[in-house]
Image (spheres, grey):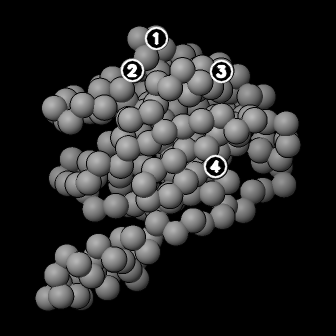
Amino acid sequence: MDVLSGVCVNTFRQGMVVCGVIAMLNLLVIPVVLAEDSPSADQQAPHVLLKTKFGEMEIVLFPDLAPKHVESFLKLTKSGFYNGTIFHRIIPGFMIQGGDPLTKDPANRNKFGTGGPGYTVPAEFSKVAHEKGILSAARTADPNSAGSQFFIMVAKSPHLDGQYTVFGEIVKTIVSQPKDLRDSPVERIEMTIEVMK
């Protein structure tokens, strides 16, 4: 990704078209190699498919690791709660975040990141590291304040380990898009999520 960023900087004269093409190339599906001891090794674990116009992410959930978070995520997914929400934060080299129902309406842009399902889920911390491809629950400073928002790691971030609830892992993923000063994508990246099994 650093090489592609450098190409964007070096091709400034050629305009945003080149950077846009490079950004699109970043969205190729990338398989994530799962560790042998990963909770996702369980073939019976529920899988969901997160779809965007830039590609799809297949997610395996960890009900043995974070049962309450998985239960909530599946309930919201089955009800269509996430459909039409966006990834409202994208931070290259760190993570992408979504799941806020307020993002369904572009007029709420200043409130993005503050919405939820109307309830919270207690923390279910584990020893699973926040590596690339990990799905984790977003929250406020209160460890027990997770709701519908989640983030997907695009790089290793050990400072999050044991501080946020890991409840799934990406089997296939997309990367990032151009963002504004608030780390919000310039172009809306709407999503739908459906249960696969």
Q: Mark 1 touching mark 2, by CB under 8 A?
A: yes
Q: Mark 3 touching mark 2, by CB under 8 A?
A: no
Q: Which residue is mark 1?
A: 119
| Discs 4/2, front | 4
Q: Mark 4 touching mark 1, by CB under 8 A?
A: no
Q: Which residue is mark 4?
A: 58
- Secondary element type, mark 1: loop
Going from N to C along the chain, the mark reached first, 4 or 2, is: 4
> How far is disc 3 from disc 4 in space, using C-alphas?
17 Å
| Discs 4/1, front | 4
Q: Work out which residue is located at the far top of the displayed protein and give it.
A: 119
Give the total of numbered labels.
4
Decide which of 116, 52 is in the foreground and name it: 52
Going from N to C along the chain, the mark reached first, 4 or 1, is: 4
Crowdedness near tag 2: few (<14), some (14–19) or many (≥20) residues, C-alpha within 10 Å: some
Going from N to C along the chain, the mark reached first, 1 or 3, is: 3
Q: Mark 3 touching mark 4, by CB under 8 A?
A: no
Q: Which residue is mark 2?
A: 116
Residue 157 higher or lower than 107, as above or below: below
Give the residue displayed 35% in from the left and 55% down from the top: 91
Q: Mark 1 touching mark 3, by CB under 8 A?
A: no
> How far is disc 4 from disc 1 in space, using C-alphas?
26 Å
Q: Which residue is mark 3?
A: 71
Crowdedness near tag 4: few (<14), some (14–19) or many (≥20) residues, C-alpha within 10 Å: many
Residue 126 higher or lower than 87, as above or below: above
- Secondary element type, mark 4: strand
Quarter in which the C terminus is drawn: top right
